[in-house]
Amino acid sequence: MEHKLADELIEAVAHGDMGALEILYYHMYREIYLYIFSLVHNRCEAEDLAQDTFMRVYKYAPNFTPQGKGKSWIYKIANHLALTYLKSNRNATSISEITPFDSGLEENAVNSQALLSAINKISDSEQQIVLMHAVSGLTLGEIAEITNLPLGTVKWKHANALKKLRKILGENFI
């Protein structure tokens, strides 16, 4: 989903359009869930926090100022909820406990497990950046804005994470 479309949908939600909220939810739930999971490492909590994210989108939509950054605004809500959860609960489980979503073919399942195992070997902040970029399609600039990190730091962590993953998985895997 593009930022401009997200802006338009959030504005519609602000005017009480539940259909617009449903469209946002349909197009963004999975990536928001995966992003939150990359932070909290707990499936149930990630599901709850993703749901809470969209409840807050509904609640705070009237306060939203459209500037072509609607998608980032939703990620900031998700980020805030996940960080608040982490501050209050330190019982996070390992990312290796996630079950691949697309495990239909045995080869995909093996590759997914190998990738998840490799991701578990990089730092939490590197996991967060790689997953936001790869799964959600956010630019490194958008990730910097959401995480409140300097762009240079995000670029460095992303490149460093990819280098580590290539070393773990082999050059052809990534």
Image (cartoon, rainbow, N blue to C red):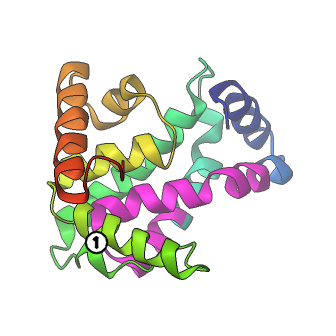
Left or right of 174 in this view: 73: right
**Would you say residue 55 sits in the magenta stretch?**
no
Left or right of 58 in this view: 83: left
Q: Quadrant of residue 122?
A: bottom left
- Residue 68, placed above or below residue 113: above
Residue drawn at point x = 55 percent, y = 25 percent: 69
Q: Main secondary structure of the magenta part?
A: helix
Name the amino acid, label 1: Ile
Question: Residue under circle 1?
Answer: 95
Quadrant placement of the N terminus: top right
- Residue 163, placed above or below residue 140: below
Q: Position of residue 14 (x, y in %)?
A: 73, 39
**Would you say residue 28 sits in the magenta stretch?**
yes
Left or right of 152 in this view: 106: right
- Residue 144, placed above or below residue 67: below
Viewer-side residue, 42 vs 159 = 159
Question: Which stretch is magenta?
Answer: 21-50
Q: Position of residue 3 (x, y in %)?
A: 63, 28
Q: Position of residue 45 (x, y in %)?
A: 39, 75
Disc 1 residue crowd, few under 14, some 14–19, many 20+, Cα 10 Å: many
- Residue 117, placed above or below residue 39: below
Q: Position of residue 74 (x, y in %)?
A: 53, 43
Q: Secondary structure at mark 1?
A: helix
Count of labels in the image = 1
Residue 149: tell me if it is visible. Answer: no
Q: Quadrant of residue 67?
A: top right
Residue 172: tell me if it is visible. Answer: yes
Q: Quadrant of residue 144?
A: top left
Residue drawn at point x = 70 percent, y = 51 percent: 27
